[in-house]
Image (cartoon, rainbow, N blue to C red):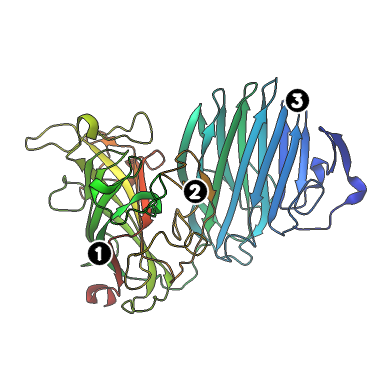
Amino acid sequence: MKGPFVRSLKVCLFLGGVLCLMPFSQAQAFSLKLESSGGANLLIADNGPGDNDPTVGAINFNGAVVPFASVTAIGITKPIIGTDDLAKMTLNVVVSTGNAGGSLKSSLTETDYFVGAAGGQEPLVSFVGGTNGLTGMTTFQSFVDTDNMEFATSGVSVCTPGAQGPFGPGAFNNSTSQDCVLNGQISLTAVAETSLGANDVQSFGSDISITRPPDTQEPLACRFTGGGVDTDNNWDGTLEDGSMQRGNGAGNLPAGIDRYTFGGQVGARTAQQPQPSGEWQHHQQTGPSGSFGFHGGTNSAAEGTRIVDVRCSDPGFCAQARPAPAKQLDFDAIGTFSNIGKGQKAPVFEIPSPNVIPEPNGGKNKEFTFHWFEVNIDDLGEPGKFNNGAPNSVTCPGRGFGEKSGGPFVPDPVNAPGTTVILPTTELANCDCPDFYRITVYKGVLNTEVTFLPDGRIDPTSMNKSDVIYESFGFVDGGNLQLHPPTGFDSN
C-alpha cells in the first residue's frame, strides 16, 4: 500500500514554526499521527515533510505540538528491524510541557507485512516501558489488522491484546500478548495516549511484533545444560572513582549491582509437548533486588511447577561449540519463590504489589504463589564468559538477542543508574559475543486461584503473563551455557 507522496494535497500548520504535513485522508502506509488537546492534528509520512530521518523505515519528528513545548517521536519498522518472517515496529516518544499541560495521542502504522504469508495463529507481543513525570499518565495499545489497513484499531479484522495501563507517575514496564489468527498480509498499528501537567517531562518506548505463521517446515529442536554466576546489566567492573574491580564476588560489588547464580537443564528427556522436561534455579544473592531463591521443575520446588514450552531458534552454532542445531533457546515455565530474604536483604521488586508468597516449609494447605517465568539462553561459543571488561555494546547489544532483546537498558548502572535507553530487538546472535542469560518473572497467582487441567497440570492461561516483577540479564561473566542436539528420544 505504499505510494508516492501526494504533494498537491499537503497542508501547513503553525506549531512554533511552519510544517507542511499531509491531511489524515492521505496516509502513505508507514506514517506517524499526532493528535493533541491543543487542536494539533499532524500526519507525518515516511520521508515526507516533518520526517527528519531520510532512512526508509524510520520516522523522526521533533518540534512543538500545541500545548506541548517539545515533542520527539521516533518510529522504526521494516526494512530496518524485523525480517521476512517477523513483523516488528517500535515507537519512542518524549514530551515536555511549558506553562500549560495537555494530552497527546501518538499513532504509528505500517502495512504489507508477510507478503504471501501462510495462515495460522501467532501471538502479537506488545511491550511498553518508560518514565512518567510527576503529573504524567500513559496508556498503550497495539493492533494487527488482517485487512492490511492503515491505523486499523477496530472491526472484525483487528486483533489486539488490549490496553496496557494507564500507568501513573514514575517508572513503568509492562508486556502482554494475544494470539491472533492470520491469513495473508497484515498491518501493525501502535497507539499511545499520554497526559502531562505544566512544566513536566515524560517518555516511553514501545515494541510490538508478530511472527509469520510457520509453513510446513519442521521447527528446530535442541536442549540445554549449563549455569553460572553473573552481575546484572553487563557491569564492566568500573567503580565510581574510575578504578576497575574484576571478579564478581558478592563482597566486591557496588551497591547498585545485582549478583545472582543460575543453572539447570531443559529438554532432557524431551523438549516436546505435551510435557517438556527440565528444571531451573535462579538465586538472587545480593544487590538492590535483595535476596531470594526461585525455581521451577526441580524436585525441591512446589508440586505444579514445570517447564511449559521450549523454543529453539537462530540456526547453526558458533566456533568451538558443540554442533548444536541452534544458537538460541527460550523456554516458558511455572515456578515458585523460596528462601526470601529479610530485613536489609528483603526483595525489592519492580512493581508495588508483586504478590509473592514463598512456598511453605513443610506443612500442607498453606497459601503460596505460582509465577510464570521466561528464560533466554544464547550459546555463542567457547569460552562462554567474557574476561576483560564488558563486551562491545554495538556488537553485543545490552539485552542480548532474540526474544525480549528489545526494551529498556541501563548502560551505566554504577555512575548513571537513572539513565535508561530503549534498545531495538536484535533477532540473530553474534558469535563474537559471550554467552547470554536472561530471566523474567511475573506477578504471582495464589495456589488456590490457579486453574488445573484435567491431567493435574496448571493451566498456563491462568497465570499472570503481563506484570513483570523481576528481570535480570547479562552476558555471562562466570560459567558456561551449552545448547546440544536433541536427545535420542526426540530424534526418534
Give the mark, 3 or 2, whose residue is nearer the N terminus: 3
Q: Is residue 157 above or below residue 171?
A: below
- Residue 29 vs residue 439: left or right? right
- Residue 404 place in picture, x, y as percent: 45, 53
Q: Are marks 1 and 3 in contact (CB under 8 Å)?
A: no
Q: Is residue 266 visible?
A: no
Quarter holding the N terminus is bottom right
The secondary element bearing badge 1 is classed as: strand
Of marks 1 and 3, the one in the foreground: 1
Measure the C-alpha gap from mark 1 to mark 3. Answer: 56 Å
Q: Which residue occupies the foreground of this view, 475 or 152?
A: 475
The secondary element bearing badge 3 is classed as: loop
- Residue 222 place in picture, x, y as percent: 32, 70
**Three-letter code for the amino acid on which mark 3 is drawn:** Gly
Measure the C-alpha gap from mark 3 to mark 2. Answer: 31 Å
The secondary element bearing badge 2 is classed as: strand
Mark 1 burial class by Cα count in 10 Å: few <14, some 14-19, many 20+:
some
Residue underneath mark 2: 407
- Residue 89 place in picture, x, y as percent: 60, 52
Mark 3 burial class by Cα count in 10 Å: few <14, some 14-19, many 20+:
some
Residue underneath mark 3: 38
Quarter holding the C terminus is bottom left
- Residue at horizontal 61%, vertical 44%? 92
Q: Is residue 320 above or below residue 58?
A: below
Residue underneath mark 1: 226
- Residue at horizontal 36%, vertical 45%? 471
